[in-house]
Image (tube, helix red, strand yellow):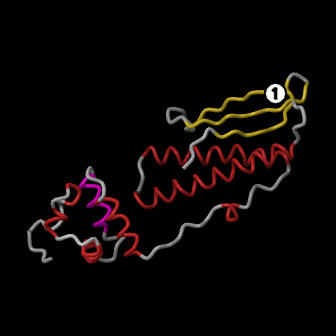
Amino acid sequence: MFLGPYTLFDIDEQNEETQFKIRIINFDIKELLNHTLTSTYQPLEERTIKTCKKHNDEQVKLLLESKAEVEKYLNQFNGGTKRLAQRDYIINTLEHFRNWYNEQGLDFLDLDRYIQQPEHKPKYQEYGDLFNRFFSDSNANPDEVKRILNDKTRWKNPSAYLSQARKKAELTVSKLKAHPGFIWIDPKGTAID
């Protein structure tokens, strides 16, 4: 995910002279809209609206890719306030670009054309990926691991998924339980390897 800064190119009247305008949009979690905006002006030289559009198209592509990535993260892990702020920053930045396209009478980029739709994995594979990620993290928070891997609304049968992922990783129940992130499994000590 790319959090910028993003630059929006424009041609603007400044002090009764046509100039090249660069708006720099920086992520700033302390600001109301999660970003700051500064503008600089340069001589127009050979730049045209076509030059601006070519650059702005590339910036929008980056923004759309970043938006898809942060939303995928939010969907998988329910995110936190920082991820929500990142998404808001990206959406607000996209609005600056959308406004520019509208002001120029240009069509905004076709979103589906530039965003690769996330591949939909089978649930057991999605669960296995999360399991492996948590198991490879020696500092995994057991409460978070339990909340995500034992979520009965997300997984039809979380204990079956856990058993399958554990067996695929060739782990015994006791070895898995020795991992700090998985101390919550088998509280009664009745699981069979």
Dominant SS type (magenta): helix
Q: Position of residue 66 (x, y in %)?
A: 58, 52
Q: Residues within 10 Å of mark 1 (few under 14, many from 20)?
A: few
Between residues 115 and 106, which one lies in front from this camera angle?
115
Where, by quadrant of the figure, is residue 149 drawn?
Answer: bottom left
Decide if residue 139 is on the left or right side of residue 71: left
Residue 181 sits inside the magenta stretch: no
Decide if residue 149 is on the left or right side of residue 65: left
List the single residue furthest toward the top: 15
Quadrant placement of the C terminus: bottom left
Residue at image mark 1? 42
| SS class, disc 1 | strand
At label 1, the amino acid type is: Gln
Decide if residue 26 is on the left or right side of residue 122: right
Is 27 placed above or below 184 here?
A: above
Q: Position of residue 38 (x, y in %)?
A: 68, 29
Q: Residue at x 77, y 44 (%)?
A: 100
Between residues 92 and 69, which one lies in front from this camera angle?
69
Please report the bounds of the magenta region as a residue range.
140-151
Q: Position of residue 190 (x, y in %)?
A: 9, 74
Q: Position of residue 140 (x, y in %)?
A: 28, 53
Where, by quadrant of the figure, is residue 26 drawn?
Answer: top right
Q: Residue at x 26, y 77 (%)?
A: 160
Q: Residue at x 83, y 32 (%)?
A: 20
List the single residue furthest toward the front: 170
